[in-house]
């Protein structure tokens, strides 16, 4: 699984892992698409409060395997909410939002946390 916080980091890690050109292109495409969707979500916009990025992490890999396991955990987390086309899906206060995408072969998950401490805690468990 490739884990990054920016397109530059995606490029560097893709080089390290010798990712195929189509995988690299898919990772960048998914990162940009998911970032755009998440940035338009009102709770994320309101929660930023001037705090610097990165408070997000992008997870990328084959549509099966470790990405599927990460999604299972996120979807059952007590303080997480998935962002869909309609907005965040939640019945509770969410400190972590996530958005997913796939091209059929590869999948990406962009996770955004309410604050830097929450992001460090999340990254400590899944990175």
Image (tube, rainbow, N blue to C red):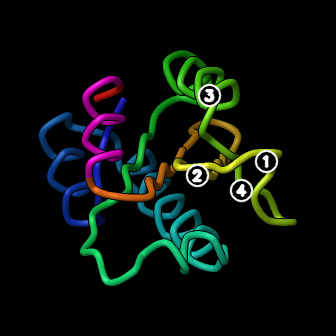
Q: Residues within 10 Å of mark 4 (few under 14, many from 20)?
A: many
What mark, if any, has residue 83 been given in the picture? 4
Classify mark 2: helix, strand or loop: strand
Is 71 or 2 nearer to us in this picture? 71
Quarter-of-image position of residue 60:
top left
Q: Can residue 18 be found in the magenta stretch?
A: no
In the picture shown, does residue 75 fall above or below 53?
above
Magenta residue span: 117-125
Residue denoted by label 2: 97
In the picture shown, does residue 9 fall above or below 79?
below
Residue denoted by label 3: 77
Count the marks.
4
Asked if the residue under mark 2 is in contact with the one under mark 4, i.e. CB atoms within 8 Å, the reply is: yes
Q: Residue at x 31, y 40 (%)?
A: 3
Q: Can residue 118 be found in the magenta stretch?
A: yes
Expressed as whole percent of the image width and height from the top left, the position of residue 40 reads 64, 79
Q: CA distance from mark 1 to mark 2?
A: 10 Å
């Amino acid at each position: 699984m490739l884990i990054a916080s920016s397109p530059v980091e995606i490029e560097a890690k893709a080089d390290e892992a010798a990712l195929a050109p189509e995988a690299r292109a898919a990772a960048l495409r998914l990162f940009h698409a998911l970032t755009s969707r998440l940035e338009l979500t009102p709770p994320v916009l309101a929660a930023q409060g001037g705090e610097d990025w990165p408070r997000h992490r992008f997870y990328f890999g084959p549509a099966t395997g470790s990405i599927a396991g990460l999604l299972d955990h996120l979807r059952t987390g007590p303080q997480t909410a998935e962002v869909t086309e309609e907005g965040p899906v939640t019945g509770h206060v969410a400190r972590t939002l996530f958005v997913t995408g796939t091209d059929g072969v590869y999948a990406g998950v962009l996770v955004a946390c309410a604050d830097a401490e929450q992001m460090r805690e999340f990254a400590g468990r899944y990175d």
